[in-house]
Image: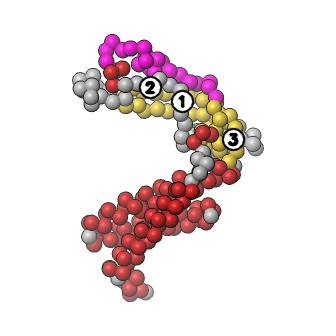
Amino acid sequence: MVRQLEKIYYPAAIIMIVIVIYAAIQDMIYLLLFIPVLLLLAMIKVYTTNQRLKYAGITTTAKIVQYESYLNFDEDLATSRRGDVKKEILIVEFTTKDNKIVRGKPMQYKLNKPELEDTDFEYPYNEKYIALRDYNPVGEEFDITYDRDRPDTFTAKQFVMEDLGWMLKFIYILSVIVVICLVSVLIEYSVVDTIKGLF
């Protein structure tokens, strides 16, 4: 099932996007079709990646080798509008079963770092803000699961979802809706006849 989805993913994505673009050229309202199409493509990608990690994944320990975090906020903004805007860089390193060293960023991860509220940004900075500013997990280790065939695809072990039956059902339902919409576009604008006329 997963391999079939992977094989048809890119051809199907190209066909669907081309049809939506063609429909949008005819009538701008069809731009709304991008919402279900992109949602469907995103869900298929998440499902196939997770299934590969679940059934063909290998769990090992990764070590954090690089970490950078920037806290950006404007002190002139009202506290209610001031957010904890973070840009975070996390690079880990691990060795595969074949003794290949892989460096990269996990698709998902969770670090044990202090959580901040809006009030924590007020000057003078409190202990939580200072603790987060000085937080440096380099050298820490955590379990990750990587794809046996594509080791650069990996995530923290706890984010490999066990039960995705609900997502598969949603993909089926969304697929039916998208196919009906795209077929109606093809019929309404006689796309098939237009293509035939070119040959």
> Quick check: is 132 in the magenta stretch?
yes
Q: Are marks 3 and 1 in contact (CB under 8 Å)?
A: no
Q: Is residue 127 above or below residue 67?
A: above
Extreme-right residue of the structure? 98
Q: Amino acid at mark 1?
A: Leu
Residue depicted at x 23% and y 23%:
76
Specify the label residue 59 is tagged with: 3
Residue depicted at x 26% and y 66%:
28
- Marks 3 and 1, Cα distance to the nearest angstrom? 18 Å
Specify the label residue 115 is tagged with: 2
Q: Amino acid at mark 2?
A: Glu
Q: Is residue 79 above or below residue 58?
A: above
Q: Are marks 1 and 2 in contact (CB under 8 Å)?
A: no
Mark 3: give few (<14), some (14-19) or many (20+) Cα within 10 Å.
some
Out of 128 and 197, give the one closest to the viewer: 128
> Quick check: is 142 in the magenta stretch?
no
Q: Is residue 24 above or below residue 136?
A: below
- Marks 1 and 2, Cα distance to the nearest angstrom? 11 Å
- Marks 3 and 2, Cα distance to the nearest angstrom? 28 Å
Can you give x and y, in whole percent of width and height, for residue 47 in the image?
Answer: 55, 55
Residue depicted at x 65% and y 49%:
54
Out of 182 and 164, give the one closest to the viewer: 164
Q: Which residues are magenta?
A: 121-141
Q: Are marks 3 and 2 in contact (CB under 8 Å)?
A: no
Out of 95 and 181, give the one closest to the viewer: 181
User: Which badge, 3 or 2, comes first in the chain's sequence?
Assistant: 3
Residue depicted at x 34% and y 71%:
22
Can you give x and y, in whole percent of width and height, for residue 124 in the image?
Answer: 33, 12
Q: Which residue is mark 1?
A: 111
